[in-house]
Amino acid sequence: MIFNLINVVLPVFVVVGVGYGLTLRGVFQQSQIDGLMKFAQGVAIPFLLFRAMAGIDLGSGFDPRLLVSFYTGAGTCFFAGLLGARVLFKREWEDCVAIGFCCLFSNSVLLGLPITERAFGPDALVGNYAIIAFHSPFCYALGITAMEIIRNRGQGGVRTVTSVLNAIFHNNLILAILAGFAFNLAGITLWEPVDDALALVASAGLPTALFALGGIMVQYRPEGDLRTIAMVCGISLLLHPAIVFGLGSALDVRQDLFRSGVLNAAMAPGINGYIFANMYGRAKRVAASSVLIATASCVVTVLLWLTLLS
C-alpha cells in the first residue's frame, strides 16, 4: 500500500517541482506564473467542475448520514483553523478565513479518488462521488460568505448580504458548479464537439494549477509560518477524519460509504486552498506550503486511517 500511495502522490510533486525549478532558473517570470494560475483558476478548473457536475449521478450513493458526517467535520475544521489562526497566531481576520479554508477543503479528486480505488477497488467510489458533488459548492459558499462578512464588518446587514451574494455569483468556480447542476437536473446533454472542446481545456486545469503552484513557491516560502502550517496539517489530516469516523460510526453509515467519507476527510488540502487564498490575496504563503507539506504528510497519516478502516 505504501508504494501505491507514493505512486499517487509523487506525480503531484513532480509537476510542482518542474514549475519551481523552471521559475527559479528564470525560464518563467512571476507574471507568467500568475497568468497560468489565472487561466487555471478562471477558465480550466471551472470547465472541469462544470463537466463533473453535469455528468455526475446525483442519486448514486446519496446518503444524508454520509454527507452530515463529512460536512459537519469539514465545517468544524474550517472554524477550528479560523479561530486557531486568530487566537494562537494573532493573524488578521482575512488571513484567518483563508487559513480556515485550507483546513476545510480536502483534495477529494486528485488524491481521494485514486487512493480509495487502490485501497478498496473501483466499486467503492460511490461515496466519493456523492461527496464530490457537494464539495466545491459547500466549501466555496462557506469560505466566501465568511470572508465577505469579515471584509464588510461594520457596513450594515444589507450591504454585507449584498456583498456576499455579489462575490458568490461573480465567482467562476461557483457559476460553473451551478451551471453543471442545472444541466444535470434538466437532463441536457452537450453536443459532442462542444463537450470534447470543454474536456480539452478542463484537462489542463489541475496540472497547470500544480505547475503554477511550484512557480509561486519560489516567491512564497514557509519561513516564519511553520507553526501555522503544522496546525493546518493537523486539522486536515487528523481532526477532520476523526470527526467523520466518530459521527459515521454513531450514525451507522453503510461500510463502503463510511470508508469513502473517512478517507476523503483524511486527504491533504487541495490546490483549491491556494486558489481561495490567491483569490483574496490573503495568507498565500501558508496556503501554498500547506498544500505541499500536508500532501507529503498524508502518505503516513492515510496508512493509519486505512489500518483503522480495515
Image (tube, helix red, strand yellow):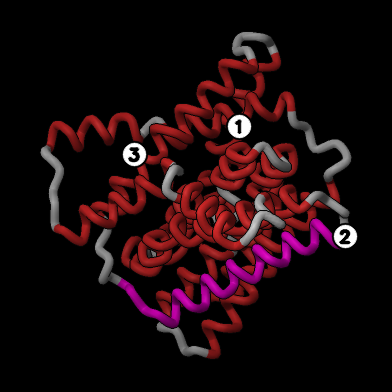
What residue does disc 3 label? 47
Q: Is residue 65 above or below residue 38?
A: below
CB-based contact (under 8 Å), mark 2 and mark 3? no
**Residue 159 picture quarter:** bottom right
Up the image or down, 16 lies above or below 237; here it is above
Give coordinates of residue 235: x percent, y percent. Answer: 71, 63
Looking at the picture, which amino acid does disc 3 mark?
A: Phe
In the displayed structure image, the side of residue 72 where residue 287 appears, left or right:
right
Residue 105 visible from this viewpoint: no
Could you tell me how far apart the alpha carbons at marks 1 and 2 are, in whole angstroms?
27 Å
Amino acid found under the numbered disc labelled 1: Leu
Numbered label attached to residue 213: 1
* Callout 1–callout 2 Cβ contact below 8 Å: no
Mark 2 and mark 3: Cα distance apart in space: 38 Å
Q: Earlier in the sequence, mark 1 or mark 2?
A: 2
Q: Which residue is mark 2?
A: 88
Secondary structure of the residue carrying numbered label 2:
loop
- For label 1, the SS is helix
Q: Residue at x 66, y 19 (%)?
A: 21
Q: x, y (%) of residue 41?
A: 48, 35
**Which residue: 34% across, 61% down?**
122
Is the residue marked by circle 1 packed among few (<14), some (14-19), or many (20+) residues within 10 Å? many
Q: Is residue 74 one of those drawn in magenta?
A: yes
- Gap between marks 1 and 3, in whole Å? 19 Å
Q: Can you say whether 222 is above or below 35 in the image? A: below
Q: State the extent of the magenta-drawn residues as a range.
A: 61-87
Residue at point 80% right, 56% down?
Answer: 85
Q: Quadrant of residue 145?
A: bottom right
Nearest-to-viewer mark from 1 and 2: 2
Magenta span main SS: helix
